[in-house]
Image (cartoon, rainbow, N blue to C red):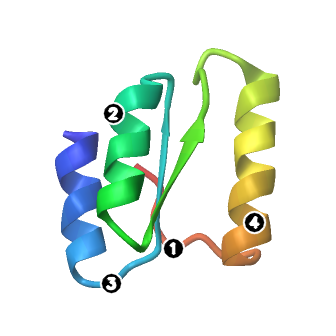
Amino acid sequence: MGQETALGFARVQAQVFILDIQDETGRKMEAEIPNLTFVHCNLRSVSEIRHAFSIITEKAGKEVDILI
């Protein structure tokens, strides 16, 4: 569900960030979709989530419109 949702937003030129532990899939999507950024993140780890959001806010600014 998350991948298809991200692709849908990317198709309409939204800036999309994918957070996942599946590096190969994430890097492939990032290479294929210009406005998509992959961030390795284990969602069970608070420190990794904090790190991911520091990357997101650095690239996207302080506003995030949608989080899935």
- Are the residues at dot 4 and dot 1 in contact (C-beta closer than 8 Å)? no
Sequence-first disc among 4 and 1 = 4
Which residue in the structure is indicated by mark 1?
A: 65
Give the CA distance from mark 3 to mark 2.
Answer: 20 Å
Callout 2: 10 Å neighbours few (<14), some, many (20+)?
few
Residue shown at 71%/34% (left/top)?
49
Residue type at the position of mark 4: Thr
Q: Could you say whether the residue bearing mark 4 is in a helix, strand or loop?
A: helix
Q: Could you say whether the residue bearing mark 1 is in a helix, strand or loop?
A: loop
Which residue in the structure is indicated by mark 3?
A: 13
Give the CA distance from mark 1 to mark 3.
Answer: 14 Å
Residue type at the position of mark 3: Gln
Residue shown at 40%/49% (left/top)?
68
Residue type at the position of mark 2: Thr
For discs 3 and 2, the disc positioned in front in the rendered view: 2
Give the CA distance from mark 2 to mark 1.
Answer: 24 Å
Give the CA distance from mark 4 to mark 3.
Answer: 18 Å
Residue type at the position of mark 1: Asp
Sequence-first disc among 4 and 3 = 3
Residue shown at 46%/74% (left/top)?
15
Which residue in the structure is indicated by mark 2?
A: 25
Q: Is residue 32 left or right of residue 48?
A: left
Q: Is residue 6 left or right of residue 43?
A: left
For discs 4 and 1, the disc positioned in front in the rendered view: 4
For discs 2 and 4, the disc positioned in front in the rendered view: 2
Percent across and percent down for residue 52 are 70, 43
Sequence-first disc among 3 and 2 = 3
Percent across and percent down for residue 38 are 51, 48
- Are the residues at dot 1 and dot 3 in contact (C-beta closer than 8 Å)? no
For discs 2 and 1, the disc positioned in front in the rendered view: 2
Q: What is the residue that sits farthest to the top in this orientation? A: 44
Label ID, residue 57: 4
